[in-house]
Structures are given as structure tokens and as C-alpha cells.
């Protein structure tokens, strides 16, 4: 499986390249795209997608660059019919519309977090919110001091899952000011410091009990592994928009077939 890494010179791009060096899940680095031309081993790095030659053999694109890249990335992927994993966060509604539209033509895997553990955290938070309808819910996310978007896309993903079973709920980002907390609000708090890879904690409490769900990422390799697993998943799929739930469900079905 030959991979084009968008954002290859960044932290996550380098993690992906290292996994390709090791042949993780059969992945092989075809080339990279970043802000400056260069070389990674035998693989060329192009300054933009328009510079990628027609002759390049690419099975899947993995994007760990910046959310604004979709304006160039997605048209390139659609034109060349290349399945794409969008692993960046912070997209605007306009950018999300571009992704959704492209999914009518090619398979696109889009998730704010590439961790299977986080996918399970989201599902557990949704289940708890539904089972405890009177509980108050707060989300705390922690990341390194270089992360640009706040709150994290993962925190918003958790909140969206909860709102899916609590239609009256709404998010309150970084609570401030003077006033009583409303039961319907979901507080989201962002911490930025040091070199924290990623932590997400969901606190679900009633006057009589508190349930805390927490996921900690110990290494950025976790997200790179998930991105390659997502790539391996969509290269055999029809056009459509896929996410971690799709991957988990697909893995479950595959496991059933082996029993």
C-alpha cells in the first residue's frame, strides 16, 4: 500500500514515515507533500499537490498537515481517484462541506482522532449520557503547548456524541463570567502545556455519584498507527465518508467471519 503523506515534515508526518519505513501493515511511503521541497530517504517531497507527477503510484493519501490544506488536497484526490484519510482537526464548515462532497466520488476517512481507544471513549460517554439523563457532564482535554486549535476536535467529537442522545444539550467552551451552571450545558475545558500528547476526560456526575471516563495517549505513534489502519480499511471501500466507528464495525464484522 503506497502512501502519500500530506504534512510529512510535521510531528505526525514523521511518525507516519517511520511506520512506513518499518512496513507497518504493508504501508510504503510513495512521496510526501509539505511547504518545502526535499527528500525523505528515497521518497521525494513536493511543495504542493500540483507538483506531484501524473506517473506517481499512490494507493492512499494520509493528511496530517493543516485543516486549510483541504482546498488543494481534496480536489487533487478526487481528480486522481485516490482514497484519502483526513486526520487534521479544526475544519471550518466550508472545509467540512468540501470533504462531504468529495466523499460522493472517493472513499474518505475523516476523524478528529485516529485512536481506537478514543473511539471507545466516545461510545462509553454516549452510553453513560443516555443511561444517566439527569447527570451533569464536563469534558477536560489536555495537549502540548504547540497545538493550535482549542478545544480539540476530539473533545468536540465527544460532545457531539452526547448531544446525539441529549438533543437539548449544548456546549459551553471555557466557562467564564458570573452565573449558575445550566444542567443542559456540556462544559469543555482546554489545557495547553508542555509536551502532553493528548488526554481526554469525561466527568459525568449526579448529586449521589460521579463516573469518570479517561483516555491518555502515551505516544504520537498511536495516531499514526490508527491512520495507517484507516488507510488499509478504505482502499477496498466504495466512495463514502467513513470514520472510526466504521473501522470498529468493519473489524468486528471481519472477526465474525473468521468464527
Image (spheres, grey):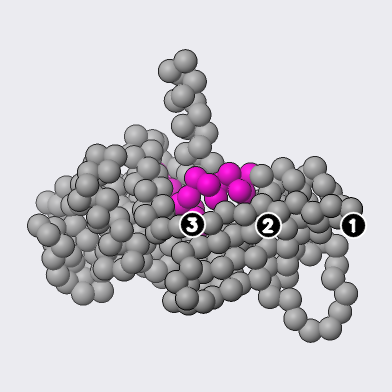
Residue at position x 51%, y 76% in the image: 193
> Which residue is more in the foreground, 202 or 174?
202
- Residue topped by disc 1: 207
| Residue furthest to the left | 42
> Which residue is more in the foreground, 144 or 113?
144
- Residue topped by disc 3: 217
Mark 1 closeness class: few <14, some 14–19, many ≥20 residues within 10 Å: few
Tag 2–tag 3 contact (CB < 8 Å):
no
Residue 214 falls in which quadrant of the image?
Answer: bottom right
Between disc 2 and disc 3, whose residue precedes?
2
- Residue topped by disc 2: 202
Report the side of 44 relative to 77 (left or right).
left
Residue at position x 20%, y 50% in the image: 21
Between disc 1 and disc 2, whose residue precedes?
2
Quadrant where the N terminus sits is: top left
From the top left corner, tell me how far across and down residue 237 is, in percent.
38, 36
Report if residue 176 lies within the magenta region: no
Report the side of 150 relative to 102 (left or right).
right
Residue at position x 40%, y 59% in the image: 220
Residue at position x 34%, y 40% in the image: 232
Q: Secondary structure at mark 1?
A: loop
| Residue range (magenta) | 102-123
Report if residue 111 lies within the magenta region: yes
Amino acid at each position: 500500500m503506497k502512501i502519500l503523506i500530506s504534512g510529512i515534515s510535521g510531528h505526525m508526518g514523521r511518525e507516519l514515515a517511520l511506520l512506513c519505513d518499518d512496513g507497518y501493515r504493508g504501508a510504503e511511503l510513495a512521496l510526501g507533500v509539505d511547504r518545502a521541497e526535499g527528500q525523505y530517504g528515497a521518497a521525494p517531497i513536493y511543495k504542493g499537490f500540483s507538483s506531484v507527477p501524473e506517473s506517481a503510484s499512490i494507493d492512499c493519501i494520509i493528511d496530517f498537515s493543516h485543516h486549510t490544506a483541504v482546498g488543494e488536497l481534496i480536489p487533487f484526490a478526487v481528480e486522481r481517484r485516490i482514497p484519502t484519510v483526513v486526520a487534521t482537526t479544526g475544519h471550518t464548515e466550508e472545509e467540512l462541506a468540501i470533504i462531504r462532497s468529495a466523499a460522493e466520488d472517493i472513499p474518505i476517512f475523516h476523524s478528529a482522532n485516529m485512536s481506537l481507544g478514543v473511539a471507545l471513549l466516545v461510545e462509553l460517554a454516549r452510553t453513560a449520557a443516555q443511561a444517566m439523563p439527569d447527570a451533569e457532564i464536563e469534558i477536560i482535554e489536555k495537549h502540548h503547548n504547540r497545538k493550535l486549535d482549542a478545544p480539540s476536535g476530539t473533545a468536540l467529537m465527544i460532545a457531539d456524541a452526547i448531544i446525539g442522545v441529549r438533543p437539548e444539550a449544548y456546549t459551553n467552551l471555557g466557562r467564564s463570567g458570573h452565573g449558575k451552571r445550566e444542567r443542559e450545558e456540556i462544559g469543555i475545558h482546554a489545557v495547553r502545556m508542555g509536551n502532553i500528547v493528548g488526554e481526554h476526560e469525561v466527568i459525568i456526575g449526579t448529586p449521589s455519584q460521579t463516573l469518570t471516563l479517561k483516555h491518555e495517549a502515551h505516544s504520537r505513534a498511536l495516531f499514526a498507527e490508527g491512520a495507517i489502519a484507516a488507510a488499509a480499511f478504505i482502499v477496498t471501500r466504495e466512495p463514502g465518508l467513513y470514520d472510526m466507528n466504521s473501522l470498529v464495525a468493519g473489524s468486528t464484522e471481519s472477526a465474525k467471519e473468521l468464527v
